[in-house]
Amino acid sequence: VFDVTKFEEPKQQTLAEVTGKIKEVLVGQKADEARSKAVNEARLALSEGLKAGKKIEDLVKEKKLTLEPLPDIDTANPPQEVPNGFEIAQEAAKTAVGSISRAVDFDKGTLLVYVSAKELRKRPDAVEVRKNQLNDLTNRERRSLFQAWFKKQHEAARVAIAKLG
């Protein structure tokens, strides 16, 4: 909740008054364009190098980029201790093994995610999960069979409901 304490009519500003704001906006736009161009060039160079059979470590050194190894990331439960872990996990899930993801902007810059491997890990409770799924599916099937049988019995009995009153 807020209170209006002062109301001023809009007025024309002089160039001297807005020069700082204009400069700030233009510098920001140029910086964004330069960053976007650099990221696209880096992504293209890395992708081409990987297709040519070079190692990611060598390509990163050539381009003077920073390669930050991360712990194994579970896309369903990204690690909380990794900055931007959720965004990294999302991009890793969409990116093929041995490929570079699309650029991901975050508060301190832009990330490119390189996926070195994807694994399907066995869960310790996999047997129990499968049993629960089997029971759920069996119960659903039985319920739908019973409902179909009951509907036919109800129609065959021609039950009439009389209104009282």
Image (spheres, rainbow, N blue to C red):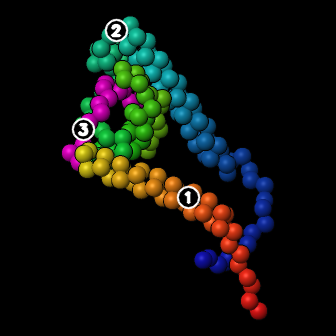
Q: Residue furthest bottom?
A: 165
Q: Nearer the viewer, residue 51 or 154?
A: 154
Do the CB atoms of the residues marked 3 and 1 lie less than 8 Å apart? no
Say what secondary structure mark 3 lies in: loop
Mark before the other along the chain sequence, 3 or 1:
3
Say what secondary structure mark 2 lies in: loop
The percent coordinates of residue 139 (x first, y second) are 42, 56
Q: Is residue 95 above or below residue 60?
A: below
What residue did someone put label 1 on?
149
Q: Residue at x 40, y 52 (%)?
A: 138
What's drawn in magenta, residue-wise?
A: 111-125
Q: Residue at x 43, y 16 (%)?
A: 47
Q: Quadrant of the C terminus?
A: bottom right
Mark before the other along the chain sequence, 2 or 3:
2
Res. 114 in view: yes
Q: Residue furthest left?
A: 124
What residue did someone put label 2 on?
53
Q: Residues within 10 Å of mark 2 (few under 14, many from 20)?
A: few
The percent coordinates of residue 72 (x first, y second) are 26, 36
Q: CA distance from mark 3 to mark 1?
A: 40 Å
Q: Nearer the viewer, residue 13 or 81?
A: 81
Disc on res. 30: none
Q: Quadrant of the N terminus?
A: bottom right
Q: Nearer the viewer, residue 29 or 145?
A: 145
Q: Amino acid at mark 2?
A: Gly
Q: Is residue 47 above or below residue 163?
A: above
